[in-house]
């Protein structure tokens, strides 16, 4: 497989992290990629870093939103600009193993809706083997809505079909500031026409703990919204039979 993969990276005030993160994307063993850096109107030097990265490699495409809109808006902008067959979402402070995208694309065939790999996040080392697992829609839906699942509802350890996002009109809810990725993933799984999902339990994505990230600064209202989202997902899950 050598289809184009669009890697969407939202950027907001991460000038100290961005170059190192993008370097791990540019170093992928799977080279047919485009990297869409979407600056959500940063107040630091993030956009200057982006300009330097774009000057070094023509696979890097840079954009800047006219005002600060939030991470969901930045990702939606990337989905609309992307040209790839597949979509990967990377947070601009995280790190990828060199074979991250290759391992995801190798899982994809006409019957697979979504490919997933393991990740490392602090004490959570979400991987156990290098054997690919095939899951039903019900099985993966349960996994993404489980706190202790090595799959998780995160978007950054997964590969999505661009056509499914466009055909099913799946976008991030821009009114949600926390758990927006969980709802996005659940909706994708519920609506994807393919009924098989793939998981390689190998740690290929490293989540970087940044004190100023949204998840570390979430307010009480944001946490309450997360619980509302989880209840919506529970309701959606009851409609999935297999």
Image (spheres, rainbow, N blue to C red):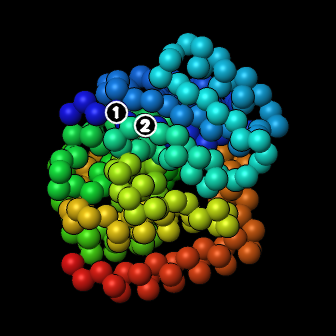
Compare residues 205 and 139 and report the one nearer the observer: 139
- In the figure, 3 relative to 136: above or below? above
Q: What residue is drawn where x is 41% and y is 81%?
A: 236
Kindly state the secondary structure of the residue where label 1 is placed. Answer: loop
* Residue occupying the far top of the picture: 56
Q: Dividing the picture into quarters, in which one does residue 204 lie? A: top left
Q: What residue is drawn where x is 27% and y is 40%?
A: 105
Mark 2–mark 1 contact, CB under 8 Å?
Answer: yes
Q: Is residue 113 visible?
A: yes
Distance between the alpha carbons at the discs numbered 2 and 1: 8 Å
Kindly state the secondary structure of the residue where label 2 is placed. Answer: loop
- Closer to the eye: label 2 or 1: 2
Left or right side of 154 for 167: left
Q: Which mark is residue 83?
A: 2
Quadrant showing the N terminus? top left
Quadrant showing the C terminus? bottom left
Q: Which residue is mark 1?
A: 4
């Amino acid at each position: 497989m050598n289809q184009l993969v669009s890697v969407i990276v939202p950027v907001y005030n991460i000038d100290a992290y961005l170059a190192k993160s993008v370097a791990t994307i540019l170093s992928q063993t799977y080279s047919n990629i485009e990297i869409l850096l979407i600056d959500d109107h940063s107040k630091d030097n993030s956009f200057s870093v982006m300009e330097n990265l774009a000057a070094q490699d023509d696979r890097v495409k840079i954009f800047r939103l006219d005002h600060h809109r939030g991470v969901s808006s930045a990702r939606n902008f990337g989905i609309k600009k992307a040209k790839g067959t597949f979509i990967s979402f990377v947070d601009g402070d995280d790190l990828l193993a060199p074979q991250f995208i290759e391992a995801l694309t190798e899982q994809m065939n006409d019957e697979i809706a979504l490919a997933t790999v393991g990740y490392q996040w602090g004490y959570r080392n979400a991987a156990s083997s290098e054997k690919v697992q095939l899951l039903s829609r019900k099985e993966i839906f349960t996994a993404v809505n489980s706190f202790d699942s090595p799959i998780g509802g995160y978007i950054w350890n997964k590969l999505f079909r661009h056509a499914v996002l466009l055909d099913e009109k799946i976008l991030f809810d821009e009114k949600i500031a926390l758990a927006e990725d969980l709802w996005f993933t659940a909706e994708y799984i519920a609506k994807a026409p393919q009924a098989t999902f793939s998981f390689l339990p190998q740690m290929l994505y490293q989540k970087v703990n940044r004190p100023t990230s949204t998840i570390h600064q979430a307010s009480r209202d944001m946490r309450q919204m997360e619980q509302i989202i989880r209840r919506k997902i529970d309701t959606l899950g009851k409609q999935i039979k297999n």
